[in-house]
Image (tube, rainbow, N blue to C red):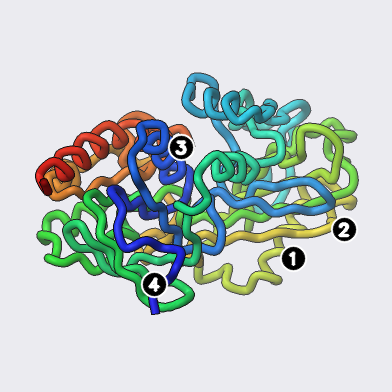
Amino acid sequence: MSDPTLPASADVLIVGGGLAGLALAKQLLVAGVDFQLVEARPRFGGRIKGSDVGGAAFDMGPAWFWPGQLRMAALTQELNLGVFEQFAQGDLSFEDEEGQVHRGRGYASMEGSFRVKGGLAHLIAQLVQSLPQERLHLHSRVTRLGEACAEIETRCNTHKIAARTIALAVPPRLAAQLDFFPALEPITHDALLNVPTWMAGQAKVVAVYDRPFWREAGLSGDAMSRHGPLVEIHDASPAEGGPYALFGFVGIPIEARRDAESLKSAAVAQLVRLFGAEAAEPRDVLLKDWALDELTAAPRDHAPLMAHPRYGMPPMLDALHAQGLFFCGTEVAATFGGFLEGALEAAEAAAPRIIKSTMSRTAASF
């Protein structure tokens, strides 16, 4: 039995409903191109994920964009979303190897960055609402890709869809797990595997409080640690009102963080060392380990990245355009790869080529 919501064909099939896939869908809609978008998750957003506590939204994936990232600035304006600067006022904290805390050392690494009011999941929700709902499909996981054809597992069963052009708005390493027919050349398959998935090895802990006691004590919420389990900590509070929050990136290996409750307890104990006894009783503690998310991380992504990779479109992947197969996730962006801006950049670069390819294939069929 096929999924009745999925048509048998489309001019363009977009695989992946994160920021890049949705942005591409928006551009194809404006251009009048027929498309269908499939997303394996039960939600849109990909690595953008929000959690709500007490009426406030907290980003469990990316949280920031920066001055000079004009596409993100334009999109927030188009969607009528408010933005605010990352809180960075007050003293910095540093925890040494022995767990001793020092003040005024280091720097506020995210100072000057922007966040979206209501969280980035609110941006995704607004973007989804701007698109035709009948063209967007959750719980739809592509398992097999052929030239101008895809097989998709849905809640109903397996569905086949014919598409003149296929746009993969997913990390290359996840694309490498698909069953391609005919099979990709080994050099092309290796090119997919060699592109690290941004953020995929990360885990993020958010501790939510009724009061911003660290601010009241003259602390910014920024901290760096060589003791752990959190290696980098920032204020994650909303633009106005509460509840308030501190969040940290987990710095221990994936093998040592599979016990979620133990990890949360260790993170709270660390926040007590850094910010005082009031940190001991959070309203809630949230954890998202992206390395354990099979729709984000491939096995090669389990080790967190130590530096920002040099992203861009590998030539072997660019060559697949002749077959009607395009990549448009943030990892292939030429300038802002890995950033939110990179997702928009990749979609912007792919859109005209996809439109041209689709028109050429349509003309060839007559």
Work out whether 31 lies above or below 322: above
Q: Name the mark on residue 265.
A: 1
Camera-near label (2 vs 3) is 3
Badge nearest the viewer, 1 or 3: 3
Residue 28 on image: x %, y % = 37, 37
Give the Cα separation between the discs numbered 3 and 4: 29 Å
Q: Which residue is mark 3?
A: 339
Q: Earlier in the sequence, mark 3 or mark 4?
A: 4
Identify the residue at horizontal 85%, vertical 57% (top origin): 283
Q: Is residue 74 above or below residue 336?
A: above
Name the kind of residue labelled 3 in the image. Phe
Q: Could you tell me the amino acid type at mark 2?
A: Glu
Q: Is residue 62 above or below residue 106?
A: below
Mark 4 crowd level (few <14, some 14–19, many ≥20, 10 Å Cα):
some
* Disc 1 crowd, CA 10 A, few/some/many (<14, 14-19, 20+): few
Query: Dividing the image into 4 quarters, which one contains the N terminus?
Result: bottom left
Q: Which residue is identified by label 2?
A: 281
Residue 75 drawn at (x, y percent): 53, 28
Please rate how many residues cluster around mark 3, counting C-alpha atoms within 10 Å: few if below 14, some from 14 to 19, many from 20. many
Q: Quadrant of residue 84?
A: top right
Q: CA distance from mark 1 to mark 2?
A: 11 Å
